[in-house]
Image (tube, rainbow, N blue to C red):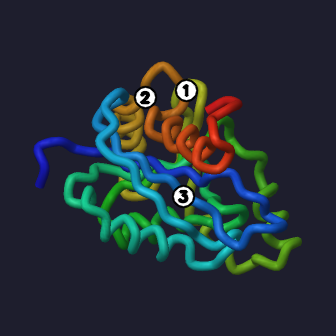
Amino acid sequence: MSRRQHILSLDDAPFDKFREKDAWVIGVVTAGPSLLEGVMTTRVPVDGEGITRLLSVWIRECRFFRSLRAILFEGITMAGLSVIDLPELHESTGLPVISVHRKIPEPGRLEETLTQLGFKERLRAVAAAGPFHPFGSIAFTCAGATTEEATAILSACRGRSFLPEGIRMAHLIGQALILGESKGRA
């Protein structure tokens, strides 16, 4: 086990949901809020099934896995409406999984969208995400960690932004990869 404990933060890069079959996922490995230790990439199907399994295999096979302390996301969907099952990802990796949100989502909105588009089987993963907890100007939900443990992890990796720095970095790298440069808020 490494002496450093790393946080893996994931975000999807911009994609055209009507033309692209796959989307890039950027993984940023950080130690604290200011030390970038590594960057990983993979591609996942847009609106695809099995996102949790795909991410789990990718994470467990990465060279950083043994030193990871937690996995962070912004939201519980990636590559469109691919819903990440937080408890399943925690169970398959053995790591706490924390999903941060700029604000608490409108109740029922994601569930309604999934139902209308024929993705009812993904509702279980949405329900499994659990309740939201406030953390400064953002909110989070988690699996594999208590609220206090998740708060400590988020506190340790937050820089000057409301979001954890690794998520912000993954967002900026994803934009640069697809658009040539980052823009907008991260």
**In the displayed structure, would residue 110 be above or below residue 173?**
below
**Which image quadrant is residue 162 in?**
top right
Q: On the image, numbered disc 1 is attached to which residue? A: 162
Helix, strand or loop at label 2? It is: loop
The reply to whether residue 172 is in sight is yes
At label 2, counting other C-alpha atoms closer than 10 Å, the crowd grade (few under 14, some 14-19, many 20 or more) is some
- What residue is shown at x 56% (from left), y 56% (from top)? 130
Q: Amino acid at mark 1?
A: Phe
Q: Amino acid at mark 3?
A: Val
- What residue is shown at x 68% (from left), y 32% (from top)? 183
Helix, strand or loop at label 1? It is: loop
Q: CA distance from mark 3 to mark 2?
A: 21 Å
Q: Amino acid at mark 2?
A: Arg
The reply to whether residue 123 is in sight is no
Q: On the rendered structure, is 31 left or right of 136?
A: left
Q: On the image, numbered disc 2 is attached to which residue? A: 158
Q: Nearer the viewer, mark 3 or mark 2?
A: 3
Q: CA distance from mark 2 to mark 1?
A: 7 Å
Image coordinates for residue 41, horizontal then vertical, percent:
46, 59
At label 1, counting other C-alpha atoms closer than 10 Å, the crowd grade (few under 14, some 14-19, many 20 or more) is some
